[in-house]
Image (cartoon, coloured by chain):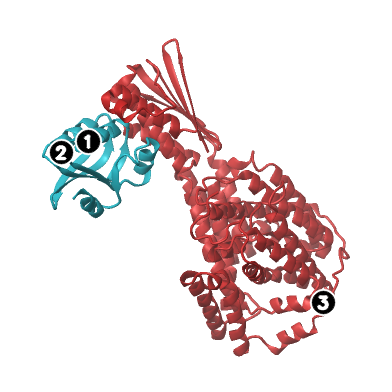
Chain colours: A red, B cyan
Amino acid sequence: MRKPSNIVYGVNDVPPLGVTVLSGVQHVGIIAASLVYPLLYTREAGLPAQASVDVLSLAMLVLGLSAILQALPRGAVGSHYLCPPIVTAAYLPATLLAVKTGGMALAFGMTLFAGFAEVLLSRVLRPLRPYFPPEISGFVVVMVGVAVGSVGLRNILGVNTAEAFSGLNVAVAAVTLATMVVLSVWTTGPPRFFCALIGMVVGYGMAGALGIIKAADLITVESAPLVHLPAVANLGWSFDVAIVIPFIVAALASTIRTIGDVTTSQKLNDADWSRPDMRSVSGGVLANGLSNITAGIIGTVAVSTATSGVGTAAATGVLSRQVAYVIGATFFVLAFFPKASAVLLIMPGAVIGAALLFSASFIFVNGIQIIASRMLDARRTFVIGLSFLVGLASDLYPAFLAEVPAEMFPFLSSSLILGSISALLLNAVFRIGVRKEQLLVVDRAAASPEKIEEFIETQGAAWGARKDVIDRAKFNLTQSIETIVDGCSPQGPLEIRASFDEFNLDVRVSYTGAPLELPEKRPTNEEIMESEEGQRRLAGFMLRRHADRVRATHNAGRSTILFHFDH
Amino acid sequence: MDLREESDGGVTIVEVTGRIDSTSAPALQERLNSVMAAPQARVLLDLGKLDYISSAGFRILLLAAKRADAAGSRFVLCGVSGKVRQLFDLGGFLDLFTIVGSRDEGIAAST
């Protein structure tokens, strides 16, 4: 793993204590914005204030647990990266439905169920990988970026929030966002590391000076108890088979999002990243599932990895797992000190909005980069393009939701869920008819390199293969055919068979003629210059080095070379 | 493969576009032999528009470099980047030639 130049502290680095602590606090400030969701649920359920505080405190404990589980340096649990958690919006529609149907007890019972579903998904991710290809992970990350940015804009503009539109709010948001962006782009060291935190402090200060933070907010902080032990599991659990599907959809959306977050974290930490490490991805999903099982048992709501947190880490260049431990410890402390958490809870909407827009920019672009890591043919273009537009429909035209049957609402009410379902279904449908092995017969007299390259490029796009792997296969095909035609006296046509299965790309060249030599040792410069034989041995040496494995066989006059590329 | 030739400050610049393989390599060899025929020739081979080079192409480049050494001429490569650079690396050629980044650097290195 080679650290990219724009990353100051990679996952295994240990930053100075001050950097670690302040980076952790910065993440806590951003994650705290998501604590609005448990408040939303308890308000919907009509819980008394004390019970609401308990749900909130327990959510903080689960957030702390999740941050630490994700960052564990080894073992089956966790992605082994800094993947900060959040109270997830992926569960918002399903949890609200549960609260309306059966109160908080049903929400907790179904969260427990969904946690087990995520654990199960984490165990079968590898065989399911063809159904969750990187372009779909990237697409989900893009949709999370859209969702996070959309919530940010709503907070700033006062759309569908408790606060109405106010020019002062927009001004606070603009100054907060500008502070974060300027520090992120034009500074280095501590100002860049803490750009989001400094921006939020500036936003709090400006909101206080302009009277946006009201006396009632200050009373909320003053009246909050200093120390409080939250009551665990005192609201009970229930289960309703009628809302199993919405919770499975939420678990699926959360899983896809975690795949995207962990993939992004891997990519951020490794300049040579080429493919998702599925062990780390599965561990990340498992950590999510275990966190949500804990959430359901102790009586709070679901969490997930936070794409906004990964985005913030990217913006600051601090990706050390030590930061995750600080996030965990801070939430463990805050859970027992309601007065401190009240300071976070009165965060003005304009400041929340600016922080979300800041993170959303990184999330959005990271998603696009993950999509672009794969070759996209017409099928995959439709999977991504149509799903993006279908997903946006729920945000752009919310009025249509009033027309759909109530049982369909959980599938349609969020651009993230709607877009994800659309992408998964279209991907499954478009897999029909894509052959895993293709044959090209090349006439030795007219072995056009362009035709050979077009063959492997077309197949690569149909399979959604990585461009760098297809480029390597392209060279091996054209160089081997050129050398065989020039030096192996092939009789009759040459056959090229290419097969693909997400993990392997195998290309076989078969012909009737002398075998092609694939030496392990490079011929000397003199040997290369002296004869065309030396030139052919150079070709064989390059072909062997360029593939991950090669195998040459010669049987009854028929020669076959197999080039294997790991994918 | 297309070859374009021009002169700048006494340096002959040969720009290669497309592919150098066993079909096109003889044409490149002929052109390089021609421009290196002059005593103490200074030749810059611009590979910035090259898409592909096979072992046949590398052989021609080795022969040209050997000829330049023997005649006290200069033979410099520029524009070796991306996939083509990977192929130079694959064949162990990056350290065998004088390779510079841009055409301007190439002219400076050739004089």
Res. A530 visible in picture: yes
Q: Position of residue B85 (x, y in %)?
A: 36, 43
- Outermost residue on the top side: it is A556
Q: Does residue A443 appear in the picture of this structure?
A: no
Residue corresponding to mark 2 = B36
Q: Which mark is residue B64?
A: 1
Seen in the picture, residue A467 relative to A177 is either above or below; the reply is above
Disc 3 is placed on an element classified as helix
Q: Chain of mark 1?
A: B
Pointer 2 indicates a residue of which chain? B
Disc ID at residue A191: none
Q: Which residue is at a point 42% across and 17% down the rendered structure image?
A: A559
Residue A61 relative to residue B58: left or right: right
- Pointer 1 with pointer 3, Cβ within 8 A: no
The Cα–Cα distance between marks 2 and 1, rounded to whole angstroms, is 8 Å
In this rendering, which labeled residue sits more in front, label 3 or label 2? 2
Asked if marks 1 and 3 fall on the same chain, the answer is no
Residue at image x 14%, y 53%? Answer: B9
In the visual, does A470 lie left or right of A321?
A: left
Q: Secondary structure at mark 2?
A: loop
Q: Which residue is mark 3?
A: A49
Q: Amino acid at mark 2?
A: Met
Vertical relation: A308 (above or below) A210: above
Q: CA distance from mark 3 to mark 2?
A: 89 Å
* Residue at x-position 77% and y-position 64%: A61
- Residue A554 position, x and y percent, is 45, 15
Chain of the residue on which disc 3 is drawn: A
Alpha-carbon distance for marks 1 and 3?
85 Å
